[in-house]
Amino acid sequence: MKHTLLLPLIIAIFTSLSAQAQQLDFGDRTSATIAGKAWGALNSKNYPDAVAYAQECVKMYEKQAVEMQNGLKEPVTGDKEAVAKMWALNDVGTCLFIMGQALEKQNKGTEALAAYKQLVEKIPFAQCWDPKGWFWKPAEGAKTRMKALEFDSLK
């Protein structure tokens, strides 16, 4: 039942962003490039573009990400190379987190919550490389933000 309620909201988010996505430069259209552009837009406070880039990555690579997720019983551990082999899982998970962050910055808490829930429920084993030298789990950050958004909605 929960998933049924989220689907129309997620579709509405993606539909409203499709026109903007047509104006963006997606480079070579790989998940890594698009995720990098989403991070860049988020870091420069260009929240609409961050959402549009993230949405495009999810649209293009979600199927592969879910397939990778479904093939795992636990998150991949070990060296950077082993984790990197889960490229679609990691990039789509990262983009859902970026999408949630950018939507929150635009005071779109309901939409941000939907992005975070999609991450936590569909691809919780996604990992993101931090330039400081380690992987972190976007789903853990998403769970924290979900609690905060749900709490805020009670006020």
Image (cartoon, helix red, strand yellow):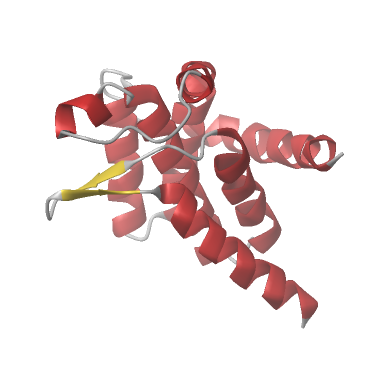
Residue 30 placement, left or right of 53: left
Q: Is residue 98 above or below residue 29?
A: below
Q: Which residue lies at the image location 64% right of the left edge and 55% below the top edge?
A: 113
Q: Which residue lies at the image location 48% right of the left edge and 18% below the top edge?
A: 71
Quadrant where the C terminus is found in the figure: bottom right
Residue at far bottom of view: 155
The reply to whether residue 142 is visible in this rendering is yes
Q: Which residue lies at the image location 54% right of the left edge and 64% below the top edge?
A: 145
Q: Is residue 19 above or below residue 124?
A: above
Q: Nearer the viewer, residue 47 or 82?
A: 82
Image coords of residue 47 (percent x, y): 45, 54
Residue 94 placement, left or right of 83: right
The reply to whether residue 23 is visible in this rendering is no
Quadrant where the N terminus is found in the figure: top right
Image coords of residue 151 (percent x, y): 69, 75
Residue 153 placement, left or right of 92: right
Image coords of residue 103 (percent x, y): 55, 56
| Quarter holding residue 125 | top left
